[in-house]
Structure formats: C-alpha cells, structure tokens
Image: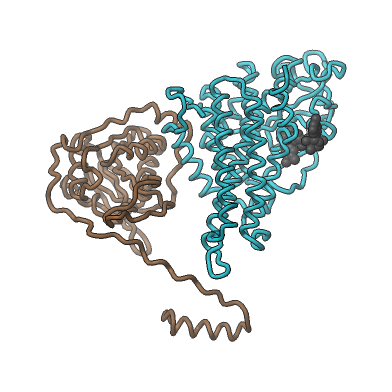
Chain colours: A brown, B cyan
Amino acid sequence: MKLLVCVKQVPDSTVRVKVAGDQKAIVPEGVTWAISPYDEYAIELALEHKDANPGTTVGVITVGPPRARDALRQALAMGCDDATLVTGADVETLGGLATARALAKVVDEVTPDLVLCGKQASDDDQGFVGQALAETLGWPHVAIVTKFVASDGGTEIWKEVEGGHEVWKASGPAVLTVQKSQKDPRYPSLPGIMKAKKKEIPEKDLASLGADLGGPSVEIRAMEPPPARKAGRVMKDGDPKALAAELAKLLRDEARVL
Amino acid sequence: MTTVTGEAAFDLSLTEEQQLVQRTARGFAAERLLPRAAEFDQKGEVPTEIVRELGSLGFMGINIPDEWGGSGLDMVTYVLALEEINRACASTGVIMSSHVSLVCDPLLRFGSPEQKSRFLRPLASGEQLGCFALSEPGAGSDAAAMRSSARRDGDGWVLNGTKNFITNGARADVALVFAQTDPAQKHRGIAAFIVERGTPGFSVGKLEHKLGIRGSDTAQLIFQDCRVPDAHLLGAADEGFKIALATLDGGRISIAAQAVGIARACLEDSVGYAKEREAFGQRIGDFQAIQWMIADMATGIDAARLLTWRAAAMKDRGERYGPDAAMAKLFASDVVMKAARDCIQIFGGYGYLTDFPAERHYRDAKITEIYEGTSEIMKLVIAEDMLGE
Ligand SMILES: Cc1cc2nc3c(=O)[nH]c(=O)nc-3n(C[C@H](O)[C@H](O)[C@H](O)COP(=O)(O)OP(=O)(O)OC[C@H]3O[C@@H](n4cnc5c(N)ncnc54)[C@H](O)[C@@H]3O)c2cc1C
C-alpha cells in the first residue's frame, strides 16, 4: 500500500507565542517549530501500518517555507520513506483552499492509495485542509480516524464517535483525517536520524504546480493574546465545615458554577 | 567551538541532525523522564524499562559507529543529548554516560575486532548495560594504588579484590575491571578485563545510599578467584592504566554535560518560580537580588556549555583534549553548585522541601565535583598541562 501523509510545521506546543505589532501574525523569532501533533499521529498510524505490512511505503509532504524541511526530516527519521517540500513565494500566507489544491496536484502525481492528514493543525485549528483536499480530488473523506486496515481490495477505517467507534469501508483511494490515538507517535531513533540525513528532500515550486491558488480565502483581521487569567484562590485556614460552606457560597455566587 | 563539519572557522551553529537529536532527547526527557524524576529519586531506582527505551532509540551507543551497533553520531551530538537528559533526570544521565563513555568508548578504542563484535555490539545497541570498575575502598583519586589483583593462570587470569562506588554495578551485564598484575610495576602493572555477569567468582556486594543521583545504583563488586580467559583482556596487559586515564578524559566531558544539564534545570525552575511567586506586592523576579542570581546562572551555564562543546569537538577532531575536558568538568561542576544553591534560595522555604525539584538539583549537583576525578584532580591535570614538560 502506498500512503501519503500531509503535515504542517507549526510552533511547538511549549512555545509562548507573541502577537506581532501589526496584530496579524505571531512573532516568528525565537519560535521552535514542530510537526503539528495530529499530523504526528497520522505519521504514526501510517508507520504502524508499514510495520505490520512491510510492502507499504510512506511518503510525507508539506506545503510550507524552507524551514519546514526540518519537519520533513523528522518524519523521515521516524521512518517515512520519502519526503517532498512544496514551497515558493507567499507560501506562508497561503490559504487553506490553495494549500489543498497544491497538495492535490502532488497527490495526482504520486497516486497514493490513501492520504492521511491530521484532523486539524494546532496553530489555527481550522480543520479545513484535509476535507478540502478530498473535495478537490473528488475522493471520499473519513474524519476523526484512529485506525485503518487493508481488507479485500479496500480499507476498513475506524472513526471515533461518542463512546465508541464506527467502522467505515473505502473501496478505493480516500483521505483520512486522523485523531489522537492510544499509541503516542514514536520518537525518531538516532540511527533513523542518521539514515534520514542521507535522504534527498526534493523541492517543488508552488507556482509551477499548475494549481489554482486564487479562489475564496480567509484573511486574518486581527489577533490578540487571551486575557491574563486571574490568580486562583486558596482556602485553607480555618474550620473545615466553615470552609466548605464558604466554598459552596463562592462557587454559587461568584463562580456561578452551582 | 568550531564546527564539526569544519567548514567555517568559528561557527557555533548546530547541524540539522544535531538539532534533531537534541529535539528527540528533549522530547524524551520532557515526556518520559521529567514527570517521574522525583519518583526515581525517592525510590532509588530508574526503572530498567527507561534504560531499555533509551537503548532502543539509540542513545546507549550514540557515538559508536553503526557497524558496532551504535548510532554513529559524534561527541558534540552526544553532549547535546546528555544535557537534555540530565536536565530532566541526572540519575538517568549518569546511567547513560557511564555506559557510553566509560564502557562502550574504551571497547571501541582498545578492543579487538572479536571483542567489539562480542561485547561492544550488544552494549552499543542497548541490549546490555555496562559498568566501569576502577575505584576501590583504598584507591580513588590515586587509582594506581589499587589492590585488586590479576594472576596469570594458564591461558587466562584469576581476579581477586573489591571495587566500590561502581555506577550501574548492580545491574550491568558487563564490567570493565581494572586489576594489578604486578604490584612492583605500579601503574604499568595494571590490566583491564571485560568480565561478564554470571562469571563464577564475580558477585555484587552492598549498594550505597547516596545524597544525590539516587536513581542510579552505586555498588560494590567482589571478585573471588574469578577466572577470565585471555580473550577478555582489553589492550595489552600493561596498558590498563593508560586505558583508564584515556577513558576518564572522555568521561569528564560527559560529566561536564551533566553539570550543564542540572544547572539548566536550576535556571528554568528558578525563572518559572520567579515569574509567579509574589512578595511585597510584586513578583520576586522584579527584585534585583533575584535577577542577579538568574543572570549569573544563565551566564555560567553558557560558559560551561561552550567549554563542554569545545572539548567534545576536539575529541571529534582527534585532537588532544584531556586538559580541555578537565577544564570543562571543573568549571561546569562549579557552575552547577552555585546554580543549585541559588535555585533553592529563589524558591525560599519551598526550595528546601521535597515537594519542589530545587532540593533534588542541589543533591544531584554535588557529585559532579567528585566522580571521574575530583575538582582537585581536575586542577592537577590542568596545572600539569600548564607547568609540565
Ligand atoms: C556516586 C558515585 C559514583 C561513582 N561511580 C564510579 C564508577 O562507576 N566507577 C569507578 O571506578 N568509580 C566511581 N566512583 C568513584 C569516584 O570516582 C571516586 O570517589 C573519586 O575518584 C574520588 O576518590 P575517593 O572517593 O577515594 O576520594 P580520595 O581520593 O580519597 O579523595 C579525598 C579528597 O582528597 C583530595 N585529593 C586526593 N588526592 C589529591 C591530590 N593529589 N591533590 C589534592 N587533593 C587530593 C580529593 O580531591 C578529595 O577532596 C563513584 C563515586 C560516587 C560517589
């Protein structure tokens, strides 16, 4: 089976992002970048399939600036077979639809059996590109996927639902958007890093793909940091009964949660 | 530090794979070690499963070539990884560095192809754990005063004696053991032997109770008429002391990296606390007294890290690096002692409690001034380089 995983490089979850002066972007200086967490789960799902089915190949692709090469290198070190970087001018402000259309061009070329994406990227949490990619390709899409297995000519796909899962079946190629699953994404092993170092990461020029990069798009009007959280209150001195009564009163009248 | 790739004459930037290893080590440390470091310390044990995980990721043979089961990375990358691991858990750090620097490294440098294939490969791939047994009850800094003996016996050797303070001693599969073949020859009579666990006459004695790095075991090893074949002699019979000293030169870089890692833990924890704790109506980080401690900490750490990287890069380039490794260890261990003291100070009374990590950093820091050569011995090495022939 030939799998293609689409990943996005985002600020690492431990980074404290700062809003830039124009209030339209974050300050890129000092940010450490990482593969978006759900995309890491998508990679893990693909690699698990490869572990169990040695004939499988796992490709990884990103549409992003040159620094996103690091994300691809990490995916290779985790065990992916090949990686492609699609980059070009204005790639950082590319909208979701244009990104999906660019990815679709590469999918047409690579002809994978399944495309895996994270269910959303952790920077803007839009949850858009995977679905838009399926739409552009004219492929079916299954969301919130935690597992898949090949089964007589198609793929059985586990989709998380409230309190359990549904099993869907795709008879041909499909786009899966992946949910966090029980098995955490593997760390790249050090020998894996050494192997990844030797691999070429071919670069494709965004403008030369022939994708329609126009079309409807969203524009960020303003960003602002969340308001500072008020400090918590500790109640510890005094008679436990009185404290409990006081706590109940505060929860009802001040916090209004009772 | 000049780069390992050697292109630019003065460039401190890291290569892509060095950064990737650093990130991997940081991720592993943050997720697998940091949440449990206090528990490892309290229980006095880093679980074997953690050491195994480090092995399967390639950390236990990080700078050993892949033909011998290692990951084939350089010394600079190794110290980057060690800093991250020690930042989370110094016990895990010394388990790894004793194994890598004090056992895998000398096997790589001095072992025969047969010895590398039989002993180094399972060690470097992390299937087995090693320990380095030089110190004795009566011979620490003056290691050549060792009493353990190796007597020639047919086509093998018979070992007798006691080693103490041996990191990983209780669970190692393989011990690198130094013994005197001829007391009249002093240090020229010392030989190094590879001894496997289970060899008749080799047993583990008492475990030490320690101030810090409590998750790493420190054991006594006892040899009573323990027979080892000639094939287990590392290097020539008169080369043991040379092997020990050369090995410790490399080990000192790893202890410097450990000190930098613990010091970074002190700094990061201090900064976090200084931003939150309030006194007299303001954050304590707004007091200049606290700011100065943090500025000193940050400066010391950077200087110590640079010395450590330089020594590592010199080793990678095949240059003579012994005195530079000694400087790195001497300086870094001094930096971490001060950082740990100030870290507790910044935490105030809470720093003194086991509920917070500051007191663990304080206890862990001290060992870096002692093992693999005390600070006094580091000065001896440096001064000899300055004043000697
Ligand atoms: C937790 C722990 C783990 C260890 N792990 C290992 C291990 O894995 N393998 C191993 O072989 N050993 C190990 N050691 C032993 C360690 O390397 C020795 O403790 C250290 O070298 C000091 O030796 P000593 O304790 O005998 O002190 P001594 O040599 O007795 O020193 C006592 C004091 O005298 C000073 N001193 C000694 N000689 C001089 C001199 N010439 N000039 C000035 N001052 C001097 C020392 O600096 C020190 O302050 C470990 C020790 C500890 C505590």
- Residue B323 percent coordinates (x, y): 66, 26
Query: Image point 78% across, 13% down: which residue?
Result: B155
Which quarter of the image is occupied by the C terminus of chain A? Answer: bottom left
- Whether residue A229 is visible, yes or no, is yes
In this rendered view, identify the residue nearer to me: B246 or A99.
B246
Query: Image point 72% across, 14% down: which residue?
Result: B236
- Residue A239 percent coordinates (x, y): 63, 84
In this rendered view, identify the residue nearer to me: B305 or A104.
B305
- Residue B104 percent coordinates (x, y): 62, 27
Q: Quadrant of ligand 1?
A: top right
Left or right for A26, reference B292: left
Left or right for A229, reference A67: right
Q: Quadrant of residue B184?
A: top right
In this rendered view, identify the residue nearer to me: B241 or B330.
B330
- Whether B66 is drawn above or below B213: the answer is above
Q: Quadrant of residue B372?
A: top right
Query: Image point 13% across, 37% down: which residue?
Result: A210
Query: Image point 80% across, 28% down: which residue?
Result: B142
- Residue A215 percent coordinates (x, y): 12, 50
Left or right for B320, reference B217: left
- Whether residue B215 is visible, yes or no, is no
Which quarter of the image is occupied by the N terminus of chain A? Answer: top left
Q: Which residue is situated farthest in the right direction here?
A: B184
Q: How many marks?
A: 0
- Whether B28 is drawn above or below B107: the answer is below
